[in-house]
């Protein structure tokens, strides 16, 4: 039974969603592609959402939000998804609505909130984050980009990397060293600064899968206003910890895709055809496809078993969970390799035209998927962890 | 491990302790070395019957406890760990399942109490060639008056030498390869016209070749529908595949434990060999296969108990995935143990030999990959 709130939200969406937008594709920056009419409609949709405060629905009204509860915000996003559209503002704001904004709400001064939050909530100001550095990845606290205070404000020097969307952002939240003499985590501060200034140069990073949102960002006497320090001086580590919690939360609560994924065997039949008895025309591929589907089913059943066990308070859960990263990698990379093989000559396309969007996406995802066995502890590191921590084998020796 | 009821946990712990104490792999070795031709140690099976294991799937009205397939699987896993020789799986899982799914009340009444009490051993006689292919059943059953006359041969009949009764799959119409025209019969092992001979297989367990020559059975021997036996046979086989997967899981887990123990104790080049990354990574890969196999086996056992409609998929998945684990693990068991693994005195060979027999039983990996693909619509 729909509540009064749900009904009003649904009605509002029905009345305000511009017609050309149903099913329009938008990229990871929240930019819609297509003819000018669609682009105009999209901007109208953004302005209408912003006027409702639905760009950041749980934020206070005075900062551009709508003061909704989490549950009410979910009603809004569900209603928009159900109408076949999406809310572009979190994407347009870059790291704003999902990460910097919520952290600002907690750590910012009233003046900082008034100055920064409404631009994020309306999707007009895009934010990026300067955290990782070439020599500070997993060990983030060893960062060396510095900021020093002079009469006019902060002066920044150093380099950040993997700064997602830096080349398209107006503002940046950056983690800097403000006290070299303190212990690693105690001399770090969080500053906010404008990207458009002579002291900042961004360079997009191209990956094997092509363009990526990632950039290298260089600071050479870049300037930040004195009052754009977020949180206390040298307390940036607490700020960033909170920020990263918001990141994880935004990843786990990301709206599920409404697109149905076509089963691999159906794609295979579409490309390769079937025999009279309904079996896939390529017997060798069919066997390997079945093998892959069974491995994936085993992986999924293992996840289900872990969830059930965890609810039952079984402590062996953690040990079992340690295998999941590698089996997820096997499943994802294996699927991509099979898809490429299924598509054959059509599976190796780099640009659309001669190749369909699906085909190009397949090749790009296959390439992008190679990262999965590298990040978050490589495939080999995972095996070391299982051998040592789970199976209790001695520390591996480098020389035998 | 699946979330078990208190009763299931109790039975699992009891089974684990009993198998290690009373029916360890050493007992199987002694049975093999005795060359007595016995299929199992009578005391061992009597103890299983006394613990109620032979009646776990048998309804209470026929003298069993009706505890379900997950419970049975927990026991089979423990037996698989020690390669305990017994007709428990063949008779009390496969035989009982055939009666439960296809039998009429009179047939159940005639055989289930005996199976539960250990006096009846009912096993399935299905395969006729080097391949498991139920629809290729060729053994002829010709209707004669009220009864039937059976002629043909069966091979690789598990516990065939000690069985008191067989469930025989026969062709009552059509040709080998046809789905239609297969019927099941219950035939006493001492029926006139049956000869059986032991197959001397690598695992030293009871496998028989049966020859049926004009074996006369009454109309009451027909188990299930005439000519339409394949669907129920497939249901019986799925439960058998899931059960044997539970046994295989135990066999492979024991091989894993033996290997892990050796990795932690064997010293070469002045170091425990488990510290070599090449071996540590292989152990990690086996651990991963083990956990995933367990997920499949338990999901399949639970699906049978729940009466789920995806039992066929899960049966092929479980047999195939645990087959993959057992195949790889039994090879690693030998390889990582090195020279000692090649000696008959050490147990590794017993596990390797049993592994391949289990792999060939009720459809190998290739069979189930093909079947899974078919079930998934390609």
Image (cartoon, rainbow, N blue to C red):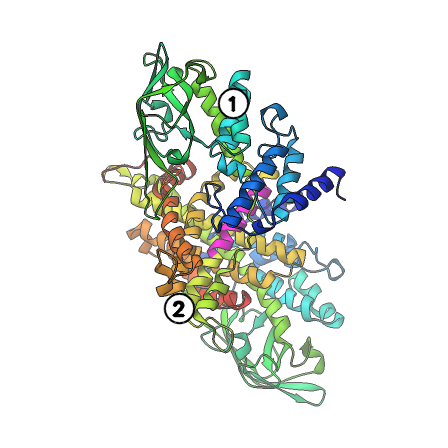
Q: What chain does mark 2 sit on?
A: A
Q: Main secondary structure of the magenta part?
A: helix
Q: Earlier in the sequence, mark 1 or mark 2?
A: 1
A190 shown above or below B43: above
Left or right relative to A258: residue A125: left
The span shown in magenta is A295-309
Left or right relative to A150: residue A86: right
Which one is in front in this view, the residue at disc 1 or the one at disc 2? 1
- Location of the C terminus of chain A by quadrant is top left
Q: Of helix, strand and loop, which one carries label 2? A: helix
Q: What residue sits right under mark 1 in the picture?
A: A104
Task: Name the disc covering residue A284, or none.
Answer: 2
B353 shown above or below B4: below
Question: Which residue sits at x=46%, y=70%?
Answer: A280
Near-viewer residue (B16 or B162): B16
Whether residue A91 appears in magenta in the rendering, the answer is no
Q: Position of residue A88 (x, y in %)?
A: 53, 40
């Amino acid at each position: 039974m729909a509540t009064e709130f749900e009904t009003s939200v649904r009605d509002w969406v029905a009345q305000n969603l511009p017609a050309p937008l149903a099913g329009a594709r938008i990229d990871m920056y929240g930019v819609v592609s297509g003819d000018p009419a669609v682009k105009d409609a999209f901007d109208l949709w953004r302005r209408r959402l912003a006027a409702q405060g639905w760009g950041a629905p749980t934020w206070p009204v005075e900062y551009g939000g709508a003061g909704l509860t989490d549950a009410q915000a979910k009603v809004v996003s569900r209603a928009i998804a159900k109408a076949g559209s999406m809310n572009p503002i979190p994407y347009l704001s870059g790291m704003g609505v999902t990460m910097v904004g919520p952290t600002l709400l907690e750590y910012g001064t009233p003046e900082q909130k008034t100055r920064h939050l409404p631009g994020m909530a309306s999707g007009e100001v895009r934010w990026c984050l300067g955290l990782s550095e070439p020599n500070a990845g997993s060990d983030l606290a060893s960062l060396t980009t510095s900021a020093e205070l002079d009469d006019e404000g902060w002066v920044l020097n150093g380099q950040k990397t993997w700064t997602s969307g830096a080349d398209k952002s107006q503002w940046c939240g950056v983690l800097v060293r403000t006290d070299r003499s303190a212990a690693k985590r105690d001399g770090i501060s969080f500053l906010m600064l404008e990207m458009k200034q002579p002291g900042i140069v961004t360079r997009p990073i191209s990956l094997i899968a092509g363009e990526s949102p990632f950039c290298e960002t260089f600071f050479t006497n870049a300037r930040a206003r004195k009052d754009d320090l977020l949180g206390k001086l040298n307390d940036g580590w607490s700020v960033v910890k909170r920020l990263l919690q918001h990141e994880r939360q935004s990843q786990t609560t990301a709206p599920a895709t409404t697109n149905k994924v076509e089963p691999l065997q159906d794609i295979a039949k579409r490309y390769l055809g079937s025999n009279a008895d309904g079996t896939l025309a390529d017997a060798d591929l069919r066997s390997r496809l079945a093998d892959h589907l069974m491995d994936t089913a085993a992986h999924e059943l293992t996840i289900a078993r872990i969830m059930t066990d965890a609810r039952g308070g079984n402590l062996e859960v953690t040990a079992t969970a340690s295998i999941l990263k590698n089996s997820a990698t096997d499943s994802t990379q294996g699927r991509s390799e099979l898809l490429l093989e299924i598509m054959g000559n059509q599976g190796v396309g780099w640009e659309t035209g001669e190749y369909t969007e699906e085909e190009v996406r397949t090749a790009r995802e296959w390439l992008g998927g190679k990262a999965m066995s590298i990040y978050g502890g490589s495939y080999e590191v995972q095996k070391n962890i299982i051998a040592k921590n789970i199976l209790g084998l001695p520390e591996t020796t480098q020389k035998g | 491990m699946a979330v078990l009821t208190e009763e299931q946990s109790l039975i699992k712990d009891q089974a684990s302790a009993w198998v290690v104490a009373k029916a360890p792999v050493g007992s199987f070795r002694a049975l093999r070395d005795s060359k007595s031709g016995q299929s199992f140690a009578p005391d061992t099976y009597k103890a299983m019957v006394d613990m109620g294991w032979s009646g776990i799937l048998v309804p209470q009205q026929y003298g069993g406890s009706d505890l379900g397939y997950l419970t049975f699987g927990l026991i089979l896993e423990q037996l698989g760990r020690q390669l305990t020789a017994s007709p428990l799986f063949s008779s009390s899982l496969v035989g009982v399942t055939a009666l439960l799914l296809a039998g009429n009340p009179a047939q159940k009444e005639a055989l289930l109490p005996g199976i539960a009490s250990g006096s009846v051993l009912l096993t399935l006689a299905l395969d006729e060639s080097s391949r498991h292919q139920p629809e290729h059943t060729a053994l002829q059953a010709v209707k004669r008056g009220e009864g039937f006359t059976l002629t043909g041969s069966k091979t690789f009949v598990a516990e065939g030498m000690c069985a008191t009764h067989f469930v025989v799959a026969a062709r009552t119409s059509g040709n080998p390869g046809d789905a239609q025209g297969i019927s099941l019969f219950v035939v006493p092992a001492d029926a006139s016209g049956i000869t059986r001979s032991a197959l001397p297989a690598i695992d030293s367990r009871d496998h028989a070749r049966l020859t049926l020559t004009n074996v006369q059975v009454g109309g009451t021997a027909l188990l299930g529908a005439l000519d339409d036996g394949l669907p129920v046979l497939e249901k019986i086989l799925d439960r058998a595949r899931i059960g044997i997967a539970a046994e295989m899981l135990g066999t492979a887990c024991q091989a894993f434990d033996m290997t892990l123990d050796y990795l932690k104790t064997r010293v070469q080049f002045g170091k425990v060999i488990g510290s070599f990354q090449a071996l540590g990574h292989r152990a990690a890969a086996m651990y991963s296969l083990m956990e995933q196999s367990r997920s499949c086996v338990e999901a399949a056992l639970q699906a049978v108990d729940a009466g789920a409609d995806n039992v066929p998929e899960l049966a092929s998945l479980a047999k195939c995935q645990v087959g993959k684990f057992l195949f790889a693990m039994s090879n690693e068991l030998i390889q990582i143990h090195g020279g000692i693994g090649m000696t008959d005195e050490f147990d590794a060979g017993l596990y390797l030999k049993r592994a391949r027999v289990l792999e060939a039983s009720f459809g190998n990996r290739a069979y189930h990959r093909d079947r899974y693909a078919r079930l998934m619509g390609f």
